[in-house]
Image (cartoon, rainbow, N blue to C red):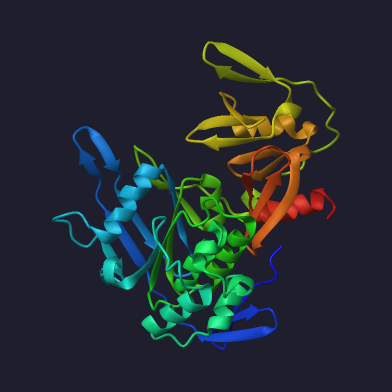
Amino acid sequence: MPSFFAVRYLLDEKICIRYKDDIHFFKEKPKTMFEINLPSKISGNRLLLPEINVAVQPGQPAAIQGEAEFLQTFLSQFMNPFTGSTNQFKLEGKPFDPHSNAFMFHQSDGLYKRLTPREVIRFWLKLYKSEENDKRLLAVCELSEVADKRVRTLPLSERRRLHFCRCLIMPSQVCVFDQPTLHVDRQTKHVFHTILDMLSDKCMVITTTSLEEAIQLGTAFRMTEHSFYQVEQTSHEQDVSEAPKGDTPLKLAKISAKMDDKIILFDPLEIDYMESQDGQTILHVNSETFFTSIPLKDLEQRLAPFGFFRCHRSYLVNLQRVREIIVWSKNSYSLSLDDQTTNTIPLSKGNYAALKELLQM
């Protein structure tokens, strides 16, 4: 686990960020809203981008999940708005130019490889006339130990953390991140969650190809070839899975899944987890996926005696497969499975408490 932690709370209209033994206070800025209103884009008979209308509040990241091609088309609009289109972006109700007044991290962004992280940060501090402290920034991004190494010698995860550092320096009201946690280690993911907490006065837009990542990082939206919509969430009371009532006898059951012209029958204990996506239920078995016509709600009732737990509205997990419970922040949790993949699945805030009680933690 990383050695840092950050806590945000309100004190006399100030934001307090605690890092190790230091407490930093920042004035609470007026609440703003960033609006994105993009018309659909079609080339020939092909949809390049669905119509997108979303309002982003400060401190509440909008995490947009979709296929890489759609995401790249979406991100390109921040730099090259559609010709003839007006009012695509608004901040506090006024036209906003992301090209000149927004921080953007893109996968193709480069760094000065001959410099060290310390030198890069000092360059940014001078460029943006920031009064931030380079030592504190290096510590927040977990780069203190490599502060004087050449950037070209750093692994991907450490370079990614250095990129994140710039958003804490650049005086922008809107921050856009292109798949920030793609191919990075867990430490870097923790750093990113901490940075999101520190950007609580800014409007944040995050893109990702992973629905699980979108749910972890903020208010999740999905972008498909048919539409753009918010992923349905539930309140604490609705989201908590109810324990089976009364004595539930152990049952023998097979879960059917269709594959080509065959129907495969799985023993419940073979299944790692299940997810609901676009009205379909997907079984994850030994790094493979299979589709079943059985709704997730029905599977939850049938598989409770086998140790399956509704960790999120869209996920049902076999607790025998769970290796770790990961706490990203006070509102973001995941489950790491004991399998061959490195993926994690989301654990909702309400069900985190229920799982702790179930496991007597």
Q: Position of residue 270 (x, y in %)?
A: 73, 27
Q: Position of residue 191 (x, y in %)?
A: 59, 65
The answer to whether 193 is drawn above or below residue 26 in the figure is above
| Relative side of 48 to 241, left or right | left
- Image quarter of residue 147: bottom right
Q: Nearer the viewer, residue 336 or 61?
A: 336
| Figure quadrant of the C terminus | bottom right
Q: Nearer the viewer, residue 227 or 130?
A: 130
| Relative side of 88 to 130, left or right | left
| Figure quadrant of the N terminus | bottom right
**Is any part of residue 143 visible from this angle?**
yes
The answer to whether 161 is drawn above or below residue 267 in the figure is below
Q: Nearer the viewer, residue 300 or 115?
A: 115
**Is any part of residue 167 visible from this angle?**
no
Q: Position of residue 77 (x, y in %)?
A: 27, 56
Q: What residue is drawn where x is 46% and y is 75%?
A: 120
The answer to whether 330 is drawn above or below residue 233 in the figure is below
User: Farthest top residue?
Assistant: 261
The answer to whether 169 is drawn above or below residue 78 in the figure is below
Q: Nearer the viewer, residue 109 or 179?
A: 109
Q: What residue is drawn where x is 52% and y is 14%?
A: 260
| Relative side of 75 to 123, left or right | left
Q: Position of residue 144 (x, y in %)?
A: 62, 75
Q: How many marks?
A: 0
